[in-house]
Amino acid sequence: MQAVEIKTLLEERLDDAEVIVSGEGCDFQLTVISDQFSGALPVKRQQMVYAHLNDLIADGTIHAVTMRTFTRDEWAAQQ
């Protein structure tokens, strides 16, 4: 699986999300920026993203995922 495929999949399934993906093969690093995360604890944010990746993880298409999640304001503060 290519990074662009994961980016497209998540941006289609997470409303108003910006996704930055690096990595290749089956090991990816994700930065997901969405106001959908507002008020959610870090674990809940990750669960929201994993919900769209679980099938790919289960079938071995994706082996390892590392992610950082931000609201748009949090992301702006990081920049």
Image: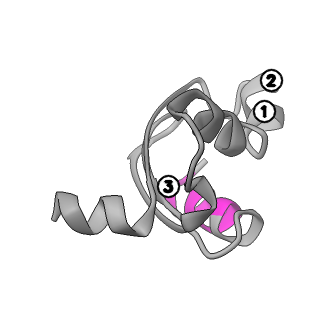
Residue drawn where x is 19% and y is 57% of the image: 78
Q: Residues within 10 Å of mark 3 (few under 14, many from 20)?
A: some
Q: Nearer the viewer, residue 69 or 28?
A: 69
Secondary element at image label 3 = helix
Q: Are marks 2 and 1 in contact (CB under 8 Å)?
A: yes
Q: Quadrant of residue 23?
A: top left
**Residue 40 percent location from the top left of the image:** 59, 43
Figure check: 51 above or below 39: above
**What kind of residue is marked 1?**
Asn
| Residues shaded magenta | 2-10
Mark with earlier residue (2, 3) = 3
Give the total of numbered labels: 3
The residue indicated by pointer 1 is 54
Mark with earlier residue (3, 1) = 3
The residue indicated by pointer 3 is 3
Residue drawn where x is 70% and y is 63% of the image: 14
Residue drawn where x is 50% and y is 38% of the image: 25
The label nearer to you, 3 versus 1, is: 1
Q: Nearer the viewer, residue 10 or 35?
A: 35
Q: Residues within 10 Å of mark 1 (few under 14, many from 20)?
A: few
**What kind of residue is marked 3?**
Ala
The residue indicated by pointer 2 is 58
Q: Residue furthest left?
A: 79
**Which numbered marker is on residue 9?**
none
**Residue 59 percent location from the top left of the image:** 81, 26
Figure check: 37 above or below 19: above
Residue drawn where x is 65% and y is 34% of the image: 44
**Residue 62 percent location from the top left of the image:** 63, 32
**What kind of residue is marked 2?**
Ala
Figure check: 46 above or below 4: above
Secondary element at image label 2 = helix
Q: CA distance from mark 2 to mark 1?
A: 6 Å
